[in-house]
Image (tube, rainbow, N blue to C red):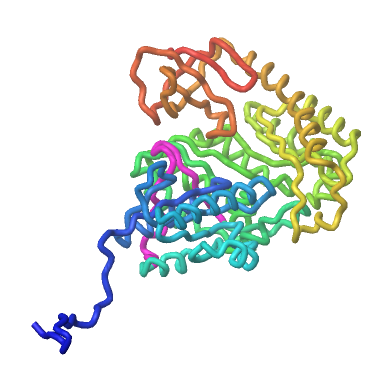
Amino acid sequence: MVFCERNCLLLPPLMKSKKLHKDIVNITTLGCSKNMVDSEVLSGQLLANGIEVKHESLKPDYNISIINTCGFIDKAKEESINTILEHVALKEEGLLEKVYVTGCLSERYKGDLESEIPGVDAWFGTMELPNILKAFEADYKAELVGERLLSTPTHYAYLKISEGCNRTCSFCAIPLMRGKHVSKSIEDLVQEAKLLAQKGVKEIMLIAQELTYYGLDIYKERKLADLLNALCEVDGIEWIRLHYAYPHKFPLEIIEVIKSQPKICNYLDMPLQHISDNMLHAMKRQITRKEIVDLIYDIRKILPDICIRTTLIAGFPGETQEDVDNLKSFLEEMRFDRVGVFTYSHEDGTSAYELEDTLSQEEKEERAQEIMGVQQDISLAKNEEKIGTIFKVIIDKKEAGRYIGRTEFDSVEVDNEVIIKTNKRLVAGEFVQVKITKAYDYDLEGEIV
């Protein structure tokens, strides 16, 4: 041992200490199913680099937090910011070591947020997966394309077929956050579907900002029909569901494929947003009321049993009570199976931001409820027509002693559920035949046949 002249022990120079514990990452996903897929891909990459990952853990069993944010509308932005602040507070209390933020809010407002919330260790945009991995000294593994760590129950998953959007809807900020439309190849998507099937996935839900635009960038023509036919060849996948199809120049060949392929659910999610011509023009939807009505009749002529889901916007700048009444009469005429109504959000950077947003949030909410009141009656009447009918139902979960499932006409979380009371043991992902015995506004009840 070496002592100094004052008889104190001389220690060797301090070496850079290594972590005494292994990083555990928790990912919180906010917003849409497209964000969920991004989180699942990130999880798969981290896991492949030997980093333990959790999804939205309710326990304080992680030391690094990644928040995948939504920046689409005011409520989503508020939720994202509150979540970030909650995690920064945990860091300040010594319960977290790092807080990283990614996703749409980060992409759109990174410059402002960096100065306003300095407790965040790093901000990443929507297309910066390799940079997130670098923060962990991890490598992006290209050979893992299609590999994901599912955050959904293992019997269903979302399949994102493209990124971004080339449409110019005046209310929408998605192109600002996600960029231009970029399709994945049919080969990569089929491979991803096969990997999902190997994990036990029975139902895949195709998502994109605009499904019908698929293929135009890489194949120079619309290729959704070809993609659907290819996905139907994947063993293990029993249901394929279509979300977010734009009505302008809608390719009717898609409906022909749905009709011809038993694996494809008789279901189409087609956001219309409004029906008054002046509103459609102001929203830059590139379509008229007559064209929408003709399209719906054409679709139903090919496939009368198809379930059409649509979403609408209430309170867009310049909307009058007459426009609301037109929307209500349109719903009564079309009798859609599923409808969602959102209130208009005045988003900076969009062309609609230049319009005067005169309605209060309360007035927008009242209009939305007025519209949904019409749809509620339609939904109940349609559900009552199903009493006595037998449907193929996929089991999602057991809750309060009852099984909860869905028909092919219902997507996860946003649509109707089928409540099943039985002593028989069922498992999630199992398909059963159910006879409907009771109808509610938005749900059904039945017994196993």
Left or right: residue 379 versus residue 390 is right
The number of discs equals 0
Q: Residue at x 50, y 33 (%)?
A: 262
Q: Position of residue 46 (x, y in %)?
A: 37, 59
Q: Residue at x 40, y 13 (%)?
A: 422
**Residue 135, image quadrant:** bottom left
**Residue stretch rendered in magenta on the structure:** 140-162
Q: Residue at x 86, y 54 (%)?
A: 355
Quadrant of the image containing the C terminus: top left
Extreme residue in the front direction: 6
Say if 203 sits above or below 69 in the image: above
Left or right: residue 407 versus residue 94 is right
Q: Nearer the viewer, residue 323 or 122?
A: 122
Can residue 38 be seen in this snapshot?
no
Q: Nearer the viewer, residue 120 or 101?
A: 120
Say if 426 sits above or below 230 in the image: above
Q: Residue at x 79, y 36 (%)?
A: 362
Q: Position of residue 237 (x, y in %)?
A: 42, 39
Left or right: residue 331 versus residue 78 is right
Q: Nearer the viewer, residue 307 or 283?
A: 283
Say if 5 sits above or below 198 in the image: below
**Residue 236, image quadrant:** top left
Q: Nearer the viewer, residue 119 or 387?
A: 119
Magenta stretch holds residue 146 = yes
Extreme residue in the bottom direction: 5
Q: Position of residue 80 (x, y in %)?
A: 58, 51
Q: Position of residue 216 (x, y in %)?
A: 63, 59
Can residue 274 be seen in this snapshot?
yes
Quadrant of the image containing the N terminus: bottom left
Q: Main secondary structure of the magenta part?
A: loop
Magenta stretch holds residue 175 = no
